[in-house]
Amino acid sequence: MNILLFGPPGAGKGTQSAFLVEDLKMKHISTGDMFRAAIKNQTPLGLEVKNILDQGKLVPDDVTVRMVEEEFQNLGGKSFILDGFPRTIAQAEALDGLLQKKGIKDVKAVFLTVPDSLLIDRLSGRRVCRACGATYHVQAKPPKDGKTCDNCGGTDIYQRPDDSREAIGTRLKVYEENTKPLREYFQKQGRLFEVDGTGEVGEVYQRIKKLLVQ
Ligand code: AP5
């Protein structure tokens, strides 16, 4: 079973992917993480996309699709979670071609639903460990001692530039216009599964896991 995990910014895609990787040993392919790694390492791709990410806009489809195509070369037969891809109809069509070429049919599109008011709270309160990428929330999930990463002991826990109020507004708008139409796209393909993304993270995970065995 392979999963396309999608939903608005802050729906919990990264948080739930971490459970799936830990529990089911799936390969996590997050286009957001890949762009952030490129920015951190100051690669040509990173320099090209930094401003786009900081503003909360979408990286052009051709750049994003090429990056995912390359990642698909290294799947090695493992089940995967695509987190944050596809995000446009053009990306979804490109992915269909890729899946067909690889003969992969067993794919569920899991759509996490969370109301806007909660999304804004989650995103503005999110903090991330710069060393390992572990995600925290100032109220809902702070590091145990308030400042050191529980996962790796890193001490640089920062706020993503695109978690500013202004960029959050842009991301929600971009989501409505470009990504939300994918619900209908996946529904027509018979692969859409909606999951309530509110409540405790563990509860949300159990809802997702139940779907996977259906
Ligand atoms: P990306 O990193 O994918 O950002 P996003 O979709 O905006 O998603 P987020 O990472 O912000 O949220 P999430 O759903 O993963 O939530 P999380 O689990 O962290 O992309 C970043 C950028 O890269 C894009 O804006 C774009 O520029 C570019 N990009 C990426 N993919 C692209 C593509 N395909 N095409 C073009 N451009 C692309 O949780 C958020 C917070 O909520 C955390 O603090 C967490 O602790 C908390 N939380 C999670 N679940 C719960 C819960 N159940 N209860 C309480 N708190 C919770």
Image (cartoon, grey):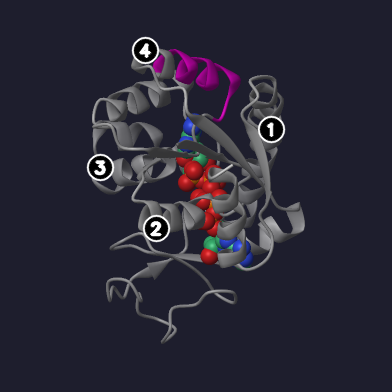
For marks 1 and 4 on the same chain, the one whose residue lies earlier in the sequence = 4
88 in the magenta segment:
yes
> Which residue is label 3 attached to?
42
Q: Give the range drawn in magenta.
A: 87-98
> Which residue is label 1 attached to?
180
- Kindly check if marks 4 and 2 are in contact, taking CB atoms under 8 A apart as contact: no
Q: Can residue 58 be seen in this view?
A: no
Q: Label 4, label 3: how many angstroms apart (C-alpha)? A: 32 Å
> Which residue is label 2 attached to?
23
For marks 3 and 1 on the same chain, the one whose residue lies earlier in the sequence = 3
Q: Main secondary structure of the magenta part?
A: helix
Report which quarter residue 117 is drawn in.
Answer: bottom right
Look at 31% across and 27% down and name the residue there: 72
For marks 4 and 2 on the same chain, the one whose residue lies earlier in the sequence = 2
Secondary structure under tag 4 reads helix
Secondary structure under tag 1 reads loop
- Say what amino acid the circle numbered 4 marks: Lys
Front-most of residues 167 and 38: 38
Q: In this view, does 136 lie to the left or right of 125?
A: left
User: Does the residue tagged 1 have its C-beta within 8 Å of any atom of ligand 1?
Assistant: no
